[in-house]
Image: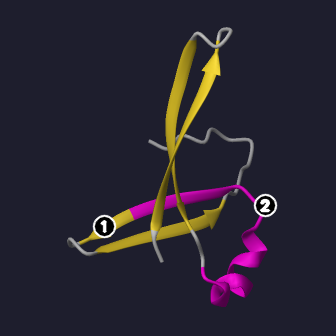
């Protein structure tokens, strides 16, 4: 499994300026399909922690109040 980086460029103001941003994505193996399927299409809260120098833990939870602010303090 790899974390992939995708850089995008969007032009605006009549092609004069460029807005650039990057997105990170993770492809999930098919063996996790059944575990992930109930969460597809739902708003999720994400928490990312590093443990040591070689481990990343990503926790996804369904959002309880979908209309609440997405920024967490």
* Residue drawn at 68 percent across, 41 percent down: 68
Q: CA distance from mark 2 to mark 1?
A: 27 Å
Q: Residue furthest front?
A: 15
Tag of residue 41:
2
Task: First in sequence, mark 2 or 1: give its number.
Answer: 2
Span highlighted in magenta in the image: 29-48
Residue 57 x %, y %? 40, 72
Decide: few, some or many residues near mark 2? Use Cα within 10 Å; few <14, some 14-19, many ≥20: few
Q: Quadrant of the C terminus?
A: top left
Residue 32 x %, y %? 64, 85
Viewed as shown, does residue 39 lie left or right of 55?
right
* Residue drawn at 71 percent across, 83 percent down: 33
Q: Compared with residue 17, is residue 33 higher up or lower down, i.e. above or below?
A: below
Q: Is residue 35 rendered magenta in the image?
A: yes
> Which structural element holds mark 1?
strand
Quadrant assignment, res 37: bottom right
Residue 65 x %, y %? 71, 50
Tag of residue 50:
1
């Amino acid at each position: 499994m790899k974390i992939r980086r995708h850089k995008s460029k969007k032009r605006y103001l009549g092609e004069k300026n460029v807005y650039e941003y990057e997105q990170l994505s993770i492809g999930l193996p098919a063996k996790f399909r059944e575990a992930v399927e109930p969460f597809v299409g739902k708003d999720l809260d994400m928490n990312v922690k590093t443990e040591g120098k070689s481990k990343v833990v990503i926790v996804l939870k369904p959002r309880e109040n979908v209309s609440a602010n997405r920024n967490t303090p």
